[in-house]
Amino acid sequence: MLREGLEKQEILKILSEKLKKDYSYKSGSILGSMCTEPFDFGVEVYMNYISKNLGDPGLFLGTAELEEELVAEIAGLLNDKNIIGTFTTGGSEANLIAMRIAKELRPDISNPEVVVPCSAHVSFDKAANLLGIKLKKANLDDNFELDLNHFESLINKNTCGVVGIAGTTSLGLIDPIEDIGKIVEDENIFFHVDAAFGGFVLPFMRYLNYKIPAWDFSVKAVDSITADPHKMGLGIIPSGGFFLRDSSILQKLGFEIPYLAGGNFKHFHIVGTRPGGTVIAFWAILKSLGINGFIEIVRECMENTQYLAACINEINGLKLATNPVMNVVGITTENNDSICKIDEKLRKKNWMVGKFEDFNLIRIVVMPHVQKIHLQNFINDLEKIVKELNIS
Ligand SMILES: Cc1ncc(COP(=O)(O)O)c(C=O)c1O
């Protein structure tokens, strides 16, 4: 470490040089991320409140109140006004919280198991590992949809929880949440829905008249939902969201920190110190965009999604893994050629897509920063690569 600090200008110059290596959303080359540039007014608000700490809410009563207001707004989107909720570091933490609740609510089970679709995000593997839960993975059918019979067959007396996904990581598909609900309805099994991605897409797609099956708290058996502001909510990183139907669980299972300056409170989080600035920023983003602002953002993403899907259908040798349900497009090869070679060549041309080797597909997430011109350039390069590799 330097003994004498550097001039600010010099530091800024070094930083700008070093950070040139980073990819930027605005360049359009990030095609495989579920994050995006936060909404600019949110950034402005965030900068004013970066020291707010919701890990000690007794000191930041105003921030804590804004968090409650924000949960109430989101409760409307998730179809149950009486839920409680809180903001996390992301979908992984929210899913971990849900898995812990599922386990803790069933102390009678000594070898707890949770049933998930095999399309579930890796955060469930992490949570299972950390919590000593056995994860049972249900198969998908040829269309990448959940095999419900297999899912049901994995449930047994050790099952403390089940998970459905509203917006899978690989393809943006929605599991049959109502059907899963019927299976666990009369059982003492916690039902969590992972809508980390879909949570801020699906409510707005309904306004755009897309047919969306019931996936949220309108399904009676759903106990909790993950929905992340830092994905399609255009929130500041890190901001995930965890929402829970039965508020009494917080009193039963919440952790308490005995020494806080603001006094004791119960919380579910894995982290202690927790950003308040991101929550305040998301409150401001919701106020600023309103429902109509989000509808317009989702409308544009879906138009670009449909454009991309139509272009893929025109390329010999490639096909859509499945018809996109939301703004996620999976691309695979017609004759089972490996997608890895295509991914490698795309990377060399600076197209950063997601690769799912198990499903032999690459994934484009058509986020708000992805413009039609980016997709046109991407398609041009993709067509050339497919020809070079003799894929047909
Ligand atoms: C469906 C789903 N759940 C959870 C996560 C994890 O979210 P995070 O990266 O914010 O922890 C992701 C990440 O893409 C996801 O797609």
Image (cartoon, rainbow, N blue to C red):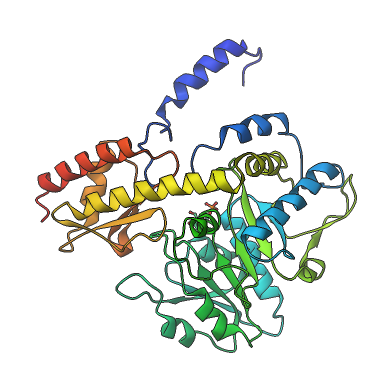
Q: For residue 275, what is the image quadrant?
A: top right
Q: Left or right: 313 with respect to 82?
A: left
The percent position of residue 96, horizontal first and vertical second, equals: 61, 62
Which quarter shows the N terminus? top right
Please report the residue visible at 48 percent of the width from the left and 57 percent of the height from the top: 205
Residue 343 image position (x, y, % from top left): 26, 48
Question: At 39% from the left edge and 40% from the top edge, which residue is drawn?
Answer: 370
Which quadrant is home to the C terminus?
A: bottom left
Residue 365 visible at all = no
- Would you place residue 334 above or below residue 276 in this image? below
Q: Is residue 241 above or below residue 224?
A: above
Residue 244: percent from left, percent from top: 69, 66
Task: Estimate the x, y position of residue 148 in percent, counting from the top left.
Answer: 43, 81
Q: Residue at x 68, y 66 (%)?
A: 80
* 6 lies left or right of 343: right
The quarter of the displayed image where residue 22 is located: top left
State whether residue 153 is above or below residue 29.
Answer: below
Q: Is residue 65 left or right of residue 316?
A: right
